[in-house]
Structure formats: structure tokens, C-alpha cells
């Protein structure tokens, strides 16, 4: 039974404190973004570019104007990313003819591109896979400082951010 008379170990205090800091930062980032999006303020997506896994060529976000774009930031080590890949594949196949572009943006700042590419090949992913590079600049922008994975961004046909999930 829990007793208020017993002191918490330093380890427990450190773990609980760390969890509280993470929870507050995630909640704060989400609330700020949600407030801005719900208030009707539109935020134009910055003009990022990523390197294509297959060709090595740059893909510029602005070239996709007129399409609905789903950016999904992922890595092989992220169990939730692994679990959602089949659903993203299905979504891509079902809606690509209606103007949806699914882009898998690999967190190349956290693992090698080769590891990510091998993993995606094993899963049979057919949507375009891109690298965010060693700096992870676009992830840092869209995640608003949170390190939560996976992160998905929906950009409308006019290039405005509609949702960050």
C-alpha cells in the first residue's frame, strides 16, 4: 500500500519529473498549433525540399501545389511508425487518383537512409520516400519542438498547413 510517509527515491523523482516535462511540452505545442488552426489563421507551408530515396534528386514541396499532401515523418526504430506504414500505403493507393500525395519523410538525422530504405522495401511501400537529411530541419519545423513520432502533416491544395498530427 502507498504511504505518504515514505520518500520517493531520487530515480523515481527524476523519471516522474522528466515525464512531466515531456507531457507539458507536447501538450503546449499541440495547444498552440490547434489554437492557431482553429482560429481560422492559415499558415503557409515553408518551401522545404527533400532527397528522393531512389533517385537522390531533390523534391520541392512547392512543386506539389494543387495536390493534397500528407507528409509522414518516420524511422525504422519507431514502433508506431512501423505499425502505421501499411495504413499509409493503403491510403496512398486508394486516394492518389483523387489528388492525394503521400510522402514518407525519413528521419535520416536519427538513423541511416540505407536502414530506412531496406525497411521500406521489406514492407513493400510504394509511395515516395524522401530523406530529411542529417539536420532534420523540416521535422523540427513541423513538430514544433516536440520529439513525438510519428508526425504527420496535411497540406492543402493551396499550400496551407491544415493539420499536424
Image (tube, grey):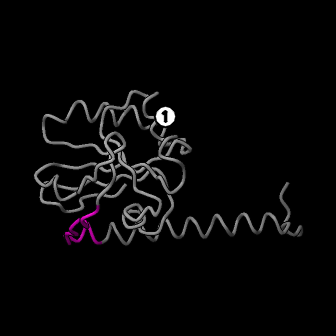
Tell me, yes or no, whether the highlighted magenta stretch contains residue 45.
Answer: yes
Name the one closer to the observer, 44 or 9: 44
Q: Quadrant of residue 136?
A: bottom left
What residue range appears in magenta? Answer: 36-48
Name the one closer to the observer, 9 or 94: 94
Q: Residue at x 34, y 68 (%)?
A: 33
Residue 100 rendering spot, x and y as whole percentages:
19, 42
Where, quadrant-wise, is the C terminus in this rendering?
bottom left
Q: Is residue 160 left or right of residue 58?
A: left
Q: Quadrant of residue 24?
A: bottom right
Residue 142 rendering spot, x and y as whole percentages:
36, 63
Residue 108 rendering spot, x and y as whole percentages:
47, 52
Element carrying mark 1 = helix
Q: Is residue 112 above or below residue 16?
A: above
The overriding secondary structure of the stretch rendered in magenta is loop
Where, quadrant-wise, is the N terminus in this rendering?
bottom right
Name the one closer to the observer, 135 or 105: 135
Name the one closer to the observer, 1 or 48: 48
Graded by Cα atoms within 10 Å as few (under 14), some (14 to 19) or many (20 or more), the crowding at tag 1 reads some
Q: Is residue 69 above or below residue 22?
A: above
Mark 1 — residue?
A: 119
Q: Residue at x 18, y 36 (%)?
A: 96
Amino acid at each position: 500500500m502507498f504511504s505518504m510517509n515514505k520518500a520517493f527515491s531520487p530515480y523515481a523523482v527524476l523519471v516522474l519529473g522528466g515525464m512531466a516535462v515531456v507531457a507539458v511540452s507536447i501538450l503546449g505545442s499541440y495547444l498552440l498549433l490547434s489554437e492557431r488552426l482553429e482560429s481560422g489563421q492559415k499558415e503557409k507551408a515553408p518551401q522545404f525540399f527533400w532527397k528522393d530515396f531512389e533517385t537522390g534528386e531533390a523534391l520541392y514541396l512547392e512543386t506539389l501545389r494543387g495536390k493534397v499532401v500528407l507528409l509522414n515523418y518516420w524511422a525504422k526504430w519507431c514502433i508506431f511508425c512501423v505499425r502505421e506504414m501499411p495504413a499509409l500505403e493503403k491510403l496512398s493507393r486508394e486516394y492518389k487518383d483523387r489528388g492525394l500525395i503521400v510522402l514518407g519523410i525519413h528521419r535520416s538525422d536519427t538513423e541511416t537512409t540505407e536502414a530506412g530504405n531496406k525497411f521500406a522495401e521489406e514492407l513493400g511501400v510504394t509511395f515516395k520516400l524522401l530523406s530529411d537529411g542529417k539536420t532534420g530541419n523540416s521535422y523540427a519545423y513541423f513538430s514544433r519542438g516536440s520529439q513525438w513520432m510519428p508526425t504527420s502533416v496535411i497540406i492543402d491544395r493551396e499550400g496551407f498547413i491544415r493539420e499536424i498530427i
